[in-house]
Every structure is written in C-alpha cells, then in structure tokens.
Image (spheres, helix red, strand yellow):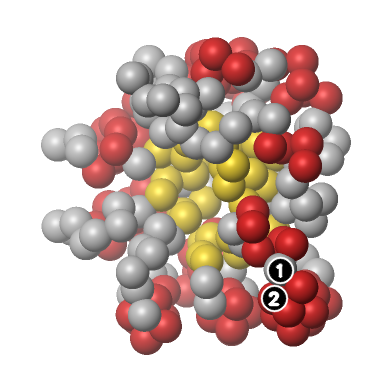
C-alpha cells in the first residue's frame, strides 16, 4: 500500500520537521494540500523540503512547479478534465512534456470512479471513514469493484484513516491511504505514523514509487 500524508491546509508547528522525519521513516508520498497558497508560497514550501524528496511530492494548481521540481504527482480536479481550454492549453502539453508524471484526482462517491478520466491513474476517495458525514462512502465501497480496477488505477482511502482502520482499508482493496488528522492532531505524529505502518500486512508494506 502506498503510504501518503496530506499536509494540513494551514501551517502547523514543526510541520517541516515532521514531514522530513516521516520521509526518513518510510513515508511514500506527501500531498501538499495548501489550497490558499499563492504561486510564490507554494514554491517556497517546495524549496523548504529537501530536494531528495521532491520526487515524492504531489501538488495541485501549479503545473509549472510540478514540472520544474519534478514532483511525483500532480492533482487535477475531476471537473477540469472536461474543460476544453484547460485540456488543450494546459493539461495535454503538460503531460506530453512529463509522460512519467502521476496524475491524481479526487472523488466523493465510489460510482464516480467509473466516469473519471482515464488519465487519472491515482485517485483519492473522500470521505471514507468519517463518522456522521452525509456522504460517508464506506457503506458503498465494493471491494470486488476496487480490485477489478487495480490494473487501471490506484485508489486511496482518505478521510478518517487511522490506526484502527488500516486493516479494513486493506480488506476493502484500497491500493493506498492518505493520513491527515491522524498525523496533525496527534501529540506524537511520527509515533502515530509508525504505529499505523506496523498495522499494514507485511506483503503490502513495500511499494515502488520512484
């Protein structure tokens, strides 16, 4: 399973230290979730992360930064795949120049996976485990369907993923997971991350993302 952490949208005390320690302890990907960042702020944030980890970052909005710093992934909103001018002048040229870039997207319903653009080979599905959420997905997840999609794309569980949910995440057939509150609300983020990783079945612990 691919182990991913999504940053908090707002700055967190010792955030960069936590990120670097997580990478040192086996983190596969970091989704830089900073929706209010300007272009300059996003670039400064990327530069604040050791360059040896740039190929493990996922960013959104700024294709030029994804290309410049050779990030592992770029996230495209589901709706943008159908935008004619965005496709013609932004996405297609970007993919042509960066054929090895992993394209990510995000959906809120399991059924949306079937209509999602095929170029999105990596998909965050949210919210999966959040309690009392109107669009809670867990009741609709079909492990047979997820397993059937493995050759087409990797689907990541996001939302409410914590140490008590990892076994269920595996059982449902997710190819990865995204941690957020389990890390940023923990008094000991790295200990929490390591404990979660230990819950992954041995055969699913190793991943090849580079």
In the foreground, 21 or 62: 62
Name the residue that disc number 2 marks: 86
The image position of residue 47, as x and y in percent, is: 39, 79
Query: What secondary structure is found at the residue carrying circle 2?
Result: helix
Query: What secondary structure is found at the residue carrying circle 1?
Result: loop
* Total marks placed: 2
Left or right for 187, reference 127 = left
Q: Tag 2: Cα neighbours inside 10 Å, few (<14), some, or many (≥20)? A: few
At x 71% / y 37%, what residue is drawn? 113
Residue 175 visible somewhere in the drawing:
no
Q: Is residue 100 above or below residue 162?
A: below
At x 38% / y 15%, what residue is drawn? 164
Left or right for 182, reference 205 = left
Q: Tag 1: Cα neighbours inside 10 Å, few (<14), some, or many (≥20)? A: few
At x 64% / y 44%, what residue is drawn? 123
Q: Which mark is residue 83?
A: 1
**Contact (Cβ within 8 Å) of mark 2 with mark 1:** yes
Q: How far is the residue under mark 2 from the one under mark 1?
A: 5 Å
Q: Is residue 208 above or below residue 197?
A: below
Residue 43: image quadrant is: bottom left
In the foreground, 81 or 148: 81
Q: Which mark is residue 105?
A: none
The image position of residue 107, as x and y in percent, is: 59, 42
At x 78% / y 36%, what residue is drawn? 114
In the rendered image, which quarter contains the C terminus?
bottom right
The image position of residue 77, as x and y in percent, is: 59, 58
In the rendered image, which quarter contains the N terminus?
top right
Left or right for 132, reference 17 = right
């Amino acid at each position: 399973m691919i182990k991913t952490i999504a940053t908090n949208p707002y700055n967190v005390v010792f955030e960069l230290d936590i990120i670097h320690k997580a990478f040192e302890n086996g983190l596969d990907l970091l989704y830089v979730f900073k929706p209010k960042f300007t272009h300059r702020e996003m670039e400064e944030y990327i530069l604040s992360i050791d360059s040896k980890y740039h190929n493990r970052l996922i960013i959104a909005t700024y294709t030029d930064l994804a290309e410049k710093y050779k990030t592992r992934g770029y996230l495209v909103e589901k709706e943008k795949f159908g935008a004619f001018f965005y496709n013609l002048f932004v996405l297609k040229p970007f993919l042509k120049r960066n054929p090895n870039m992993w394209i990510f997207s995000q959906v809120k319903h399991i059924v949306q996976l079937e209509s999602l653009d095929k170029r999105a080979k990596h998909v965050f599905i949210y919210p999966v485990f959040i309690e009392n959420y109107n669009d809670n997905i867990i009741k609709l997840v079909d492990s047979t369907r997820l397993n059937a999609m493995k050759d087409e794309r990797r689907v990541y569980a996001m939302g409410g993923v914590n140490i008590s949910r990892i076994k269920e995440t595996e059982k449902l057939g997710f190819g990865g997971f995204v941690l957020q509150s389990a890390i940023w609300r923990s008094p000991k983020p790295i200990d929490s991350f390591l404990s979660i990783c230990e819950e992954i079945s041995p055969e699913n612990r190793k991943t090849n993302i580079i």
